Image (cartoon, rainbow, N blue to C red):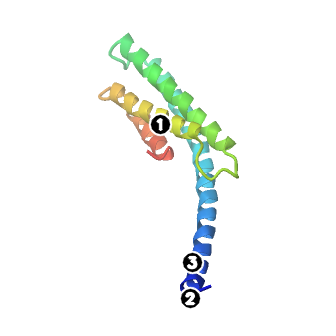
Amino acid sequence: MNRQTRRLVPVLLVLALVSASCAGTIRDRMRTSALMVGEAALDIDKMEQQIARANPPIYKSPEQAKQANTVLLRMLEAARAYERGVKAWPADMPDMPQNIWEAQSIALKAIAEAEHILAGLPGTEELFKLLTKLRGYLGG
């Protein structure tokens, strides 16, 4: 073994160990955030139900109420799929499974759509805060 190779071996060993520990750490962090994703999604669902039952109505039309309900349901389903996917992520799999990426993307897109639909409606401030919190938990 030449001198450069002897110097390179310890560096490569340290890099390999750091990468292995980071993969576990990322997965563990995602597991923790996935629990918060599930809780935030349920809080959003409860808040949306309160808004839907508000008297006088917050939504400007039945069509707007239907759009909001549809997009928030899609977000809820995607967030729960994300939560289940992260929970089922095998420890021996270093890369994030495709189903988690897909659920994350769908949830983030639904959050953006919901914000667009709800923009300017009175009484939706708390819902916006929850959507922002959920986006953060999802890494968006």
Quadrant of the snapshot with the N terminus: bottom right
Q: Name the residue that disc number 3 marks.
A: 11
Which numbered dot is residue 3? 2
Task: Look at 32% across and 16% down and name the residue there.
Answer: 60
What's the residue type where badge 3 is placed?
Val
Identity of the residue drawn at 60% across and 78% down: 9
At which x and y percent is residue 116? 33, 29
Quarter holding residue 79: top right
Who comes first in sequence, dot 1 or dot 2?
Answer: 2
Q: Position of residue 4 (x, y in %)?
A: 54, 84
Label 1 or label 2, whichever lies nearer to me, is: 2
Amino acid, disc 2: Arg
Instruction: Look at the numbered discs 2 and 3 and tell me whether their residues touch, using CB distance below 8 Å.
Output: no
Residue 54 can be seen in this image: yes
Q: Where does the image place residue 53, in percent across and percent down from the top left? A: 47, 17
Q: Amino acid at mark 1?
A: Ser
Label 1 crowding class (10 Å Cα cut-off): few <14, some 14-19, many 20+? some
Q: Position of residue 93 (x, y in %)?
A: 66, 50
User: Does 17 sit above or below residue 2?
Assistant: above
Q: Earlier in the sequence, mark 2 or mark 3?
A: 2
Query: Where, by quadrant of the figure, is residue 17 drawn?
Result: bottom right
Q: Is residue 104 above or below residue 93?
A: above
In the foreground, 29 or 7: 7
Vertically, is 45 above or below 4?
A: above
Marks 1 and 3: which is nearer the front?
3
Q: Which residue is mark 1?
A: 105
